[in-house]
Structures are given as C-alpha cells and as structure tokens.
Amino acid sequence: MRKLVLALTLLGSPALASGIEIEVAGEAKGVIKIDLLEDIAPNHVAQITALASEGKYDGVVFHRVIEGFMAQTGDVQFGNSTADKFDMRMAGMGGSDLSDLDAEFSDVSFERGIVGMARSQNPNSANSQFFIMFAPGTFLDGQYTVVGKVTEGLDVLDMIKRGEGRNGSVLGEPDRMVKVTVTD
C-alpha cells in the first residue's frame, strides 16, 4: 500500500526543473541554456547532469556540425580540447566511463532547438554525446532519445563552426564548450 501511495505521489508531482548552461567559445561566443526533460528521459538527464557536475564536458569540442541539421558534442573521452593528447581526428569516437543507456523514446518531435542523445546503430548505446537541432528533423522522431530543449542562445547555436569534412566533421579549430554548468 505504501508503494502505491508513493507511486501516486510521484506521478502527481511536477518534474524537477533542471537544466544546463553551456558557455561556447570559437566562432560562436556566448551561452546556450537548455531545459532538461527529466520527465521523459530521466536516466539520460541523470547521466548528463552527473558528467556536467564533474566538469567532464568542460573543454569538449563540437566535432560534427551539419548545416541545416545539427551540432554534435559531448565526447568526453576523445573530444576534450584541453587534454594533453587531444587529437581532433578521434573526437566523436568515444564516450564516458559510465554505462551506455537504454533508449528513452518519447513523443517529443525533433524541432529546432531540441537536444537529443547521439548513439551508434544500437538504440541502447547513448552515453555522453548529444546534439542540438538547427532545424526540424522529424525523421529522428522515435529513433533517438530527446533530453532537452534550448531556451536561450539559439543565436549562439547558429554561429557554431560548421563541419566541412566527411559526415559533417569539423576541420581545423572547432568551437568548444568552455564550461557546462548544471542549473536548477
């Protein structure tokens, strides 16, 4: 009975309001604020906030940026531009030391400003990488986990250096997340 009361209480409670602020440097300069959607992707949001709280995203580059589609970042293993052995050719190939996550698909559509989790061909392989939509991409609906929505800083997003390499890889000096902060 207590479990039923607890479950009903949690269902009736509003989701915790948390987000992240991303300080961007490079061709783009400024802050992107994102509301995280714990109610639809609680495990993914928990992983992102844990990594951000530990400073793992600080210095990580936007390694894949496709005009009219999205900007991808979050490779905390190989994408940290402040690491001694940083190699831009490896950025996008890694994740974190945390476990991969099972997909948490929702009815939220991939519109401009939506944040989704990157993954391999396996839908249950998201880890630390995420992408922010420049434009609608409804073909991703139900295929990738939505974790948030940009509330401020779309102008900063629009200035992020575009990739000119294969599959949108950024050549030369990429833009980066200088600091990622968890907000209430």
Image: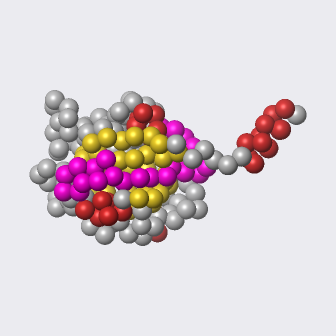
- Is residue 75 among what the camera can see? no
Q: In this view, does 104 lie above or below 85?
A: below
Residue 184 image position (x, y, % from top left): 52, 42
- Name the residue located 67 percent from the left edge and 49 percent from the top edge: 14
Q: Where is residue 4 in the image (x, y as percent from the top left)?
A: 83, 38
Of 17 and 89, nearer the camera is: 17
Q: How is the image coloured?
A: secondary structure
Number of residue marks: 0
Q: Is residue 86 magenta?
A: no
Q: x, y (%) of residue 57?
A: 33, 39
Which quarter of the rendering shows the N terminus?
top right
- The vertical placement of 41 against 133, above or below, is above
Residue range in magenta is 23-47
Query: Horizontal placement of 156 versus 85: left or right?
Result: right
> Which one is in front, 154 or 121?
154
Determine whether, in the image, residue 152 is placed left or right of residue 45.
left
* Residue in the image at 36% along x and 62% along y: 154
**Residue under the point 53% across and 60% down:** 142
Tell me if residue 45 is in the magenta stretch. Answer: yes
Residue 84 visible in the snapshot? yes
Quarter occupied by residue 170: bottom left
State the residue lying farthest toward the right.
1
Residue 138 percent across, percent down from the top left: 46, 69
Identify the residue at horizontal 83%, vertical 38% (top origin): 5
In this rendered view, identify the residue nearer to me: 123 or 53: 53
